[in-house]
Amino acid sequence: MKDNLQDELLIRQMVERWAVWRDAGDWQRFATVWHPQGVMMATWFQGPYADFIRVTQEGWAKGVSILHFLGGSAIEVAGERAIAQTKMTISQRGMVEGINSGEAGPVLCDVVCTGRFYDFVQKHEGQWKLLHRQPIYEKDRIDPVDSAAVVKLDQRALAGFPEGYRHLAYIQTHIGYTVKLDMPMLKGPVVDALYARGARWLAGGELER
């Protein structure tokens, strides 16, 4: 029990460092939280962690603003493997259609998406590293930064995105990203399949990407 608690604390430390170093643009230290075979699955990117760092840096250079805030964690440890679920929010700022100062035009907005990081974590050279991150997208909303502005979204386009990350997908598509439309949400067969994959891997099975 004591050893598991120590492992849980170290895993939580890794998860917190991911958020702080990524959002601070501390790329050198951010790279250290990842397992050599680490993979990131996001709405706008899916692939090896090194490529994730590269495209995130490219987004920073273009003014893309995506930040993270963490809540509580539930961590299951089995030997040198663990599944960590951490409550989180993703906050992205960008322009959408609307009315500003009485005139039609772009409106600066914040999208906030609430969900969980579902992490496959494994020991590598004695340290807990992030092997595979799959966010679960539970719900989201969009608000203008200027409370006097009015957001006028394309409702038909909005309805084409999954409910759990509808506004996040909308704003990411507007800035040129291709959004993955079958990500796990709060309920449904996709998130149930993720839980099953996690249980099989924790029991010693192969990691099913």
Image: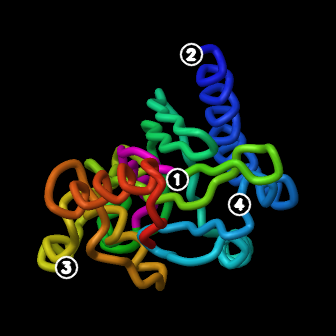
**Dot label at residue 157:** 3
In the rendered view, does 4 fall on the left or right side of 29? left
Residue 177, percent from left and from top: 46, 82
Q: The magenta stretch spans which residues? A: 107-119
Q: Earlier in the sequence, mark 1 or mark 2?
A: 2
Which residue is rendered at x = 18% and y = 60% of the image? 163
Label 2 sits on residue:
1
- Circles 2 and 3: CB distance less than 8 Å? no
Residue type at the position of mark 4: His
Residue 192 numbered mark, or none: none
Residue 143, compared with residue 58, is above or below; it is above
Please tell me whether mark 1 or mark 2 is closer to you in this view: 2
In the image, is 161 to the left or to the right of 110? left
Identify the secondary structure beneath mark 4: strand
Report the Cα–Cα distance between label 1 and label 2: 21 Å
Q: Amino acid at mark 1?
A: Phe
Mark 4 vs mark 2, foreground winner is: 2
**Circle 4 residue:** 35
CB within 8 Å, label 3 to label 4? no
Label 2: few (<14), some (14–19) or many (≥20) C-alpha neighbours in 10 Å: few
* N-term mark: 2 or 3: 2
Q: Is residue 196 left or right of residue 74?
A: left
Residue 141 shows up from this direction: no
Marks 1 and 3 sit apart, C-alpha to C-alpha, by: 33 Å
* Cα distance between the residues tagged 2 and 3: 50 Å
- Where disc 1 sits, the SS reads strand
Q: Nearer the viewer, mark 3 or mark 4?
A: 4
Depth check: give the residue in front, 162 or 142.
162
Residue with the mark numbered 1: 120
Question: Quadrant of the rendered structure where residue 82 is?
Answer: top right
Q: CA distance from mark 3 to mark 4?
A: 37 Å
